[in-house]
Each structure stands twice: as C-alpha cells, then as structure tokens.
C-alpha cells in the first residue's frame, strides 16, 4: 500500500520540491540537514527509500562541496533530473541567503547578546541529537555482514576518533567496501538486490 | 565610471577566490576557512581579522551551510551584487559536479556496480555520520548537558519519527536557557 506512493515513477512537482527544500534550508540550524531531509523526503512523503537515500548521503560527503547542498542536488536529480536538482539547490539556499543578508547588515547589534548565544547552543545540542537519530538508522542498515560492520567501525574510528583526513580514508574504504558488496553469481546479469539480501 | 570598473574587478576577484574553494572543499565547509581568511584578510585586505572572526561567529548561528561566510564577505565588499556573485561562485561549481555524479548514479539503478556501490557506501555513510556526531559534540564543548539534550532529542525522534523537529530544537534552547539562568552552565 505504501509501496505505491513510494514509486519513483510518480512525478513530484517542482513546486513541491522547492517548498520542501526551502523549509529544510530555513530550519537548518546547527548543520544537521541530513535528518531533516530524511524526515521530509522519506518518512513524510515517501519520495525515496532509505536504501536510495543513505548511499546518497555518503556520495554527498565524499564529493567536494557542502554535504547538504550536494544531497539536495542528489535528491532533486533523482526526482526530476536537472530541473529537480536546480530547484532543490535554489530552494535550499533561498532562506539562508536572505537571512545572511539581514544578519550581515545588522550583526554588530546582537553578536554579544548572551541569552541568544545560550539558546543557540541548546539548539545545536538538539540538532546533534537529530543527526544521531539518522546515524542510528544508517548503522542499522549496515548490520548485514561482518565486513560491512568492520567498514563502518573503521570509518568511524579513522574519521571521528583518529581525525584522519577524509580523502585518504575514503580512498581506502570505498573500493574495499564496494568490492565486498559486489553481487555474486552473475557479474553481467541483473542482480536482484532483495534476493541478495534474503540469501545473505 | 571608475567605481563601476573597480566593482567589476572586485566581483571577478570574489569569483576567482570562491569558485576554486567550492570544488576544493571536500569534507564540508571546515576546509575553506583557512584559505578564505588568507585571501580576504591578508591578500586582498577586504576585511580586518576581527571582522572575519565576527562573521565566523555569526555564520555559525545562521541557517544554511557555514561556508555562507564567503557570501557575507561578498556583501561586505560589493553589496548585494557581491553577495549574489559569491553565492553562485560558492555553490554552482560543486553542485554541477554533484549533479553529474548523481545522474550517472541514478541512471545505473539495478546494475551490478550500482548495487555494489549502494551497499558498499551505506556502512561508510554510517561511519561518517557517527563521526560527525562525535565531532560536533566535541566542538560544542562536550558538556554533560549537551550530551543529555542530544540523547533526549535522538530518543524522542526515534519514538516519534514524524514529529516536527522545531519543538525539539526549541526544547533544547529552553533547557539551556533554564540551566544558564540557574547558573548551571556559563
């Protein structure tokens, strides 16, 4: 039943894409945009599935540029091609652009206002919690093989704990992880991912 | 019209500085601060070091990517036009690259390489997101209250996944405000 609404064949209107990304852009305090997109695009609207979304998150982080705008372009492209990507990106940057204009013109007035700084710290803390929620769903999706778990832990430790540079870590992890995930039995055929999953 | 000419030069200089940073900023906006400060403060002397620090602090509290500081500098040196030119230079190059990659990616649906990439990238995304949580937590000072609020927010969102994030963020602000008024945090 919910499968029907989630088919990518169904065209999402450009206006709907703009509206969603505008709201995501405006509310994107503390840098936690991925959970917002996950909620708006997958949980509420069913425009995509987690299994299409999560690799997009990795792709967006690996490519140069801001993760959130990259992810908006990725989602927009998936939904409506070039127009979708352009609309998603524009929608996402409209709000921040306008706020930035206002802030740059007036920031001297409020920069030292302590209660505002405290409130922003609290908002940031809650925003980190939202990212954690997305992280947990990504962790769950990665629990399908020992190697997958090893890749996840190695990436976390290398980047999060050891603070190794992203490019080198990704250059090692991506080929390793992708080779291990290559569907077996029928290299040139049409692998069925669901069957693969059930067999595993 | 000497003024126009110099504005044009400033806009070109903005583009020349920001467009390469757009493509070079792998791993988010963190990477652009050092080169941006060097160009805008030291080389071009568009703004003072103190102004750069102020803009950095303000940018942290604005919605949107923190690299938007590039557009704030654009506005300082060339007004609204400067801000628009800076936005384009900051986000169009990287987005164009991402669009190309997304297209190849999404057209390869169901192919062996795509299945492999999708399943191979998921654990990397998981590791990166969790590393990001840790980095942001440390950046925020790593206080006990921050940890409590972030765990509470994550739990709340797990329990009610369709809940609007606004009350969650607002709740975080209220809790911190209360703790500050009671003298529990500084």
Image: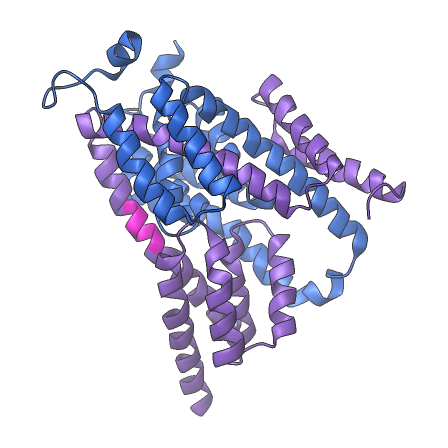
Chain colours: A blue, B purple
Residue found farthest to the right: B182
* Quadrant of the rendered image containing residue A113: bottom right
Between A147 and B138, the one nearer to me in the picture: A147
Q: How many marks?
A: 0
Residue positioned 42% across, 29% down in the render: A152
The magenta stretch spans residue A69: no
Which x, y percent locates residue A46?
42, 22
- Camera sees residue B138: yes
Q: Is residue A73 found left or right of A101 in the rendered image?
A: left
* Quadrant of the rendered image containing residue A125: top right
Magenta region = B94-99
- Camera sees residue B1: no
User: As displayed, is residue B172 above or below residue A68?
Assistant: above
Residue positioned 55% across, 34% down in the render: A131
Which x, y percent locates residue B128?
45, 37
Residue found farthest to the left: A188
Which x, y percent locates residue B106?
25, 34
User: As displayed, is residue A193 above or below residue A86?
Assistant: above
User: As displayed, is residue B114 above or below residue B62?
Assistant: above
Q: Is residue A84 found left or right of B107 in the rendered image?
A: right
Which x, y percent locates residue B62?
61, 52
Residue found farthest to the bottom: B2
Which quadrant of the rendered structure holds the N terminus of chain A? top left
Main secondary structure along the magenta-highlighted residues: helix
């Amino acid at each position: 039943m919910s499968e029907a609404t989630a088919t990518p064949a169904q065209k999402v209107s450009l206006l709907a894409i703009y509206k969603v990304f505008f709201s995501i852009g405006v509310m994107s305090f503390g840098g936690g945009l991925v959970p917002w997109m996950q909620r708006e695009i997958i949980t509420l609207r069913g425009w995509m599935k987690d299994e299409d979304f999560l690799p997009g998150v990795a792709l967006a982080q690996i490519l140069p540029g801001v993760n959130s705008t990259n992810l908006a372009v990725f989602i927009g492209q998936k939904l409506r091609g070039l127009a979708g990507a352009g609309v998603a990106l524009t929608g996402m940057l409209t709000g921040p652009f306008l706020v930035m204009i206002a802030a740059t013109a007036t920031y001297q007035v409020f920069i030292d206002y302590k209660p505002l700084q405290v409130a922003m710290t609290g908002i940031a803390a809650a925003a980190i919690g939202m990212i954690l929620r997305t992280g947990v769903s990504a962790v769950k999706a990665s629990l399908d093989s020992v190697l997958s778990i090893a890749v996840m832990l190695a990436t976390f430790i290398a980047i999060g704990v050891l603070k190794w540079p992203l490019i080198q870590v990704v250059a090692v992890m991506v080929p390793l992880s992708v080779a291990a995930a290559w569907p077996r039995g029928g290299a040139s055929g049409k692998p069925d991912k669901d069957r693969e999953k059930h067999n595993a | 019209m000497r003024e126009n000419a110099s504005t044009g030069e400033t806009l070109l200089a903005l583009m020349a500085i920001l467009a390469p940073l757009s493509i070079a900023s792998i791993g988010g906006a963190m990477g652009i601060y050092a080169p941006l400060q060097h160009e805008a403060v030291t080389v071009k002397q568009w703004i003072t070091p103190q102004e750069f620090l102020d803009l950095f602090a303000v940018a942290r509290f604005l919605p949107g990517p923190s690299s938007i500081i590039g557009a704030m500098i654009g506005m300082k040196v060339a007004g609204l036009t400067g801000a628009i030119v800076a936005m384009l230079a900051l986000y169009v190059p990287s987005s164009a690259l991402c669009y190309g990659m997304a297209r190849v990616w999404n057209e390869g649906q169901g192919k062996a390489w795509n299945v492999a990439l999708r399943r191979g990238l998921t654990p990397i995304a998981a590791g990166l997101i969790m590393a990001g949580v840790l980095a942001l937590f440390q950046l925020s000072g790593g206080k006990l209250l921050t940890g409590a609020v972030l765990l509470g927010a994550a739990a709340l969102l797990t329990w009610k996944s369709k809940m609007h994030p606004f009350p969650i963020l607002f709740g975080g602000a209220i809790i911190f405000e209360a703790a500050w008024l009671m003298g529990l945090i500084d």
